[in-house]
Amino acid sequence: MTATGPTTSTGEPLRVETLPSLPGLGGLYARGAAASGRIAAGRALPGLPGIGSGEPADGPLVLPDVAYRVTGVETADLATHLRDYQRLLHEPASDAMPAGYLHVLAFPLATAVMVRGDFPLPLLGMVHLTNAVEHRGPVRVGDRLEVRAWAENLRPHRRGVQVDLVAEVWPDGGAERPVWRGVSTYLAKGFEVPPSTSPEDGDRAPAGTWIPPLPTGRWALGPGTGRAYGAVSGDRNPIHLSALSAKAFGFPRAIAHGMYTAARALADVGHARGDAYRWTVEFAKPVLLPGTVDVAVTPTEDGFGYVGWNARRRLKHFEGTVTPL
């Protein structure tokens, strides 16, 4: 990736649309709900004028060939917001933005891609599978930034299709590469794309019985954890806010944001990660709120591994790595 412009993972150039500012998540979720309804109706009634695509429900899925960009993103007024994030996630107070905070900064632009009229998958019901981040150096309050986002790599999953939403943070004014890059992989159940010739992440054989390691920490997460992270991140998805709103989407209680758990594990690694690092996470069973999560952070040959689980039921919630660069 260079300053010449965004390309897909296969090297295809994308048309760049520059937005005047980073969008707000509240309006995007409203648009996403409407778009999800249109997609569901279009699949059920493909020939319905104004709703259906005119193609069969199993017709080809095509991602938009566009990347969104916002330049001149000012961060000088984010000091208080950053402190609130650091306090909630147990990050040390600093003017340097951790990788999880930059995800919060860039997430609305990636969401804007997912609510486009030509995005073929519904925002509501998408399952967050994994995240892979490269944090290539410190980004500090006062830095002026450029944010980019696009979708790529639509591929089969045994329960539907998965797609990567890519977001990047660049120093504003040009650079050889982004200072932060995150790839979030989502699953849309019930959709199909032509199978590839190589095995996909979603087609792995089920693992055997998992034996938890010795914990290095334990998190006691109260019922308001989702609301607190939603206030900081802007992600007020109903499944995170209350038992009542979560039940409407099939959950017995509210669930913690996946990125809250991943970012808190990143904070548990602490200063040993350095100023530049790779950070990955795979999500498994959601964390019901209120709840208790046992966590183990362990050194590896290249850096650190971490895992979080429910000790009573021996259910893994998430696991990942942090590798200094």
Image (cartoon, helix red, strand yellow):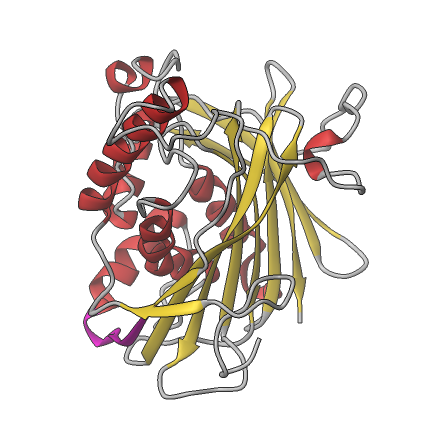
Residue 258 vs 17, above or below: the answer is above
Instruction: Identify the residue shown where x is 22% and y is 76%.
Output: 76
* Coordinates of residue 188 in the picture (x, y in percent): 50, 31
Specify whether residue 296 is in view: no
* Coordinates of residue 235 in the picture (x, y in percent): 29, 42
Query: Residue 203's image quarter?
Result: top right
Q: Does 267 sit left or right of 193 as displayed? A: left
Q: How many marks?
A: 0
Instruction: Identify the residue shown where x is 30% and y is 49%.
Output: 233
Query: Residue 255's image quarter?
Result: top left
Looking at the picture, tell me which residue is in the foreground, 144 or 30: 30
- Examine the structure image and report whether residue 70 is included in the region drawn in magenta: yes
Instruction: Identify the residue shown where x is 39% and y is 44%.
Output: 119
Residue 317 vs 7, above or below: the answer is above
* Coordinates of residue 290 in the picture (x, y in percent): 37, 22
Magenta stretch prevailing secondary structure: strand
Query: Residue 313's image quarter?
Result: top right
Residue 70 vs 125, above or below: the answer is below
Looking at the picture, tell me which residue is in the foreground, 266 or 14: 14
- Examine the structure image and report whether residue 108 is included in the region drawn in magenta: no
* Quadrant that contains the C terminus: bottom right
Specify whether residue 141 is in view: yes
Looking at the picture, tell me which residue is in the foreground, 106 or 77: 106
| Magenta stretch, residue numbers | 69-77
Residue 227 vs 290, above or below: the answer is below
Instruction: Identify the residue shown where x is 57% and y is 75%.
Output: 1
